[in-house]
Image (tube, grey):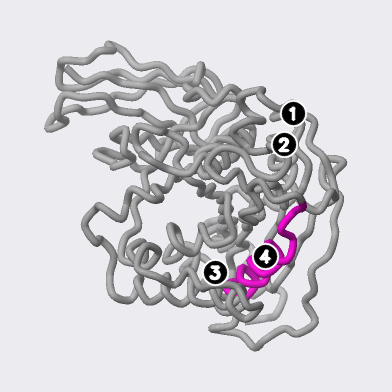
């Protein structure tokens, strides 16, 4: 076959069988430097192992435990940061050689100076806010107090920047997300579950970091939010494989070494090790800027509540595209999902079967390449 004809053939095949990029951006937002390792470590490690992914960590506080000390506990905070970098390098170096040229650097995001550590396909951002110490930490500051209005600003532990209110903090986290997801459509957002009824007896830093992440992600084309439970999982049954336990133990041990090599006491103890055999998470609906679940005005379901064998779904699109519909429980379990549905510009209708669907509250999601929209469905 002549070269020109061969090229034309390849071009024709590319039109018939388009290649879709599989690259994913996985964002993890946590409060303290050992939180992603303890509560999400097996999932984060797996995301890092796929080197076609971009993995972004955003740490809101220093985990400095300053409390009522007269000065900030910067030495301990920096030790914990070194531990995070240990965990990242360990995870990223499993399949590629060490990159000794990578260094932490200061970046300007939304008018704030942040510390960023770019290592291969992983980016780690340190906001260095004071550890809330279950109420308030250095100079009476905490994420909870900022959110509730008991303080009107919060300053980084190293005095590098000040956030003028909760909205400023959320907008800064959103700006990081926007910077790191530009050009990508396959984006997942992972954070600590901010629902106190689900993530019981948890640290306020965890809950409010999760809420800030959810609000920051509400304006992005994020395909899925996942909320993780924290302290309460110690009382739940072990639920991950031996291999996943090894992943979590590895990244946590390296984080702990960042502390002990500086002479501080180890947290590799029974209370922390209990978390390593358990990972509990659920898929969450998007939330609006006030932290309330976001339900789309572009998708409706009728009848709702539904007692029959099916419901009719109506949705409006601004352009013709392929979509999918999915029915999930409030805990994120998918009970029904369509195949690809060719849809037109304008109003569309689709019948969703409910045979075998137990009574309860569900979310019906409209899934497109640019994101997901949801509506609540009550099944009688």
Give whichever of discs 3 and 2 has the lower sequence position: 3
Q: Secondary structure at mark 2?
A: helix
Residue 13, picture quadrant: bottom right
- Per the image, the residue denoted by label 3 is 48
Q: Nearer the viewer, residue 372 or 54?
A: 54
**Residue 89 in sight here:** yes
Can you give x and y, in whole percent of width and height, for residue 162 in the image? 82, 39
- Per the image, the residue denoted by label 1 is 165
- Per the image, the residue denoted by label 4 is 76
> Residue 358, relative to residue 54: is it above or below?
above
In the displayed structure image, the side of residue 329 where residue 347 appears, left or right: right
- Per the image, the residue denoted by label 2 is 169
First to last magenta residue range: 71-88
Identify the image quadrant of the N terminus. bottom right
Q: Nearer the viewer, residue 124 or 284?
A: 124
* Dots 4, 3 in contact, CB < 8 A: no
Q: Residue at x 52, y 42 (%)?
A: 134
| Mark 3 crowd level (few <14, some 14–19, many ≥20, 10 Å Cα) | many
* Pair 2/4: label in front: 4
């Amino acid at each position: 076959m002549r070269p020109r004809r061969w090229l034309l053939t390849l071009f024709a095949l590319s039109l018939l069988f388009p290649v879709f990029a599989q690259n994913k951006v996985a964002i993890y937002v946590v409060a303290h430097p050992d939180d992603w390792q303890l509560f999400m470590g097996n999932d984060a490690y797996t995301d890092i192992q796929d080197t076609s992914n971009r993995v972004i960590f955003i740490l809101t506080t220093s985990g400095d435990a300053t409390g009522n000390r007269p000065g900030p506990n910067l030495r301990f905070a920096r030790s914990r940061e070194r531990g995070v970098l240990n965990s990242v390098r360990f995870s990223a170096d499993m399949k590629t050689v060490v990159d000794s040229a990578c260094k932490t650097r200061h970046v300007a995001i939304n008018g704030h100076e942040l510390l960023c550590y770019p290592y291969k396909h992983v980016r780690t951002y340190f906001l260095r806010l004071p550890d809330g110490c279950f109420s308030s930490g250095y100079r009476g500051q905490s994420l909870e107090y900022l959110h509730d209005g008991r303080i009107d600003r919060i300053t980084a532990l190293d005095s590098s920047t000040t956030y003028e209110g909760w909205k400023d903090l959320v907008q800064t986290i959103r700006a990081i997300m926007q910077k790191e997801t530009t050009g990508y459509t396959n984006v997942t957002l992972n954070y600590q579950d901010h629902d106190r009824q689900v993530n019981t007896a948890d640290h306020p830093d965890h809950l409010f970091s999760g809420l800030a992440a959810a609000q920051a992600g509400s304006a992005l084309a994020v395909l899925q939010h996942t909320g993780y439970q924290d302290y309460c999982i110690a009382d739940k049954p072990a639920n991950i494989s031996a291999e996943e336990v090894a992943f979590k133990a590895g990244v946590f041990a390296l984080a702990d070494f960042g502390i002990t090599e500086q002479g501080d006491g180890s947290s590799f103890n029974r209370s922390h090790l209990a978390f390593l055999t358990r990972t509990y998470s659920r898929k969450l609906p998007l939330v609006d800027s006030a932290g309330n679940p976001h339900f789309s005005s572009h998708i409706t379901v009728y009848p709702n509540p539904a007692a029959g064998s099916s419901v009719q779904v109506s949705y409006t699109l601004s352009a013709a595209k392929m979509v999918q519909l999915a029915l999930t429980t409030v805990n994120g379990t998918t009970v029904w999902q369509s195949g690809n549905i060719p849809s037109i510009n304008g109003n569309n209708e689709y019948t969703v079967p409910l045979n075998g669907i137990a009574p309860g509250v569900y979310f019906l999601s409209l899934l497109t390449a640019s994101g997901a929209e949801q509506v609540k469905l009550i099944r009688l």
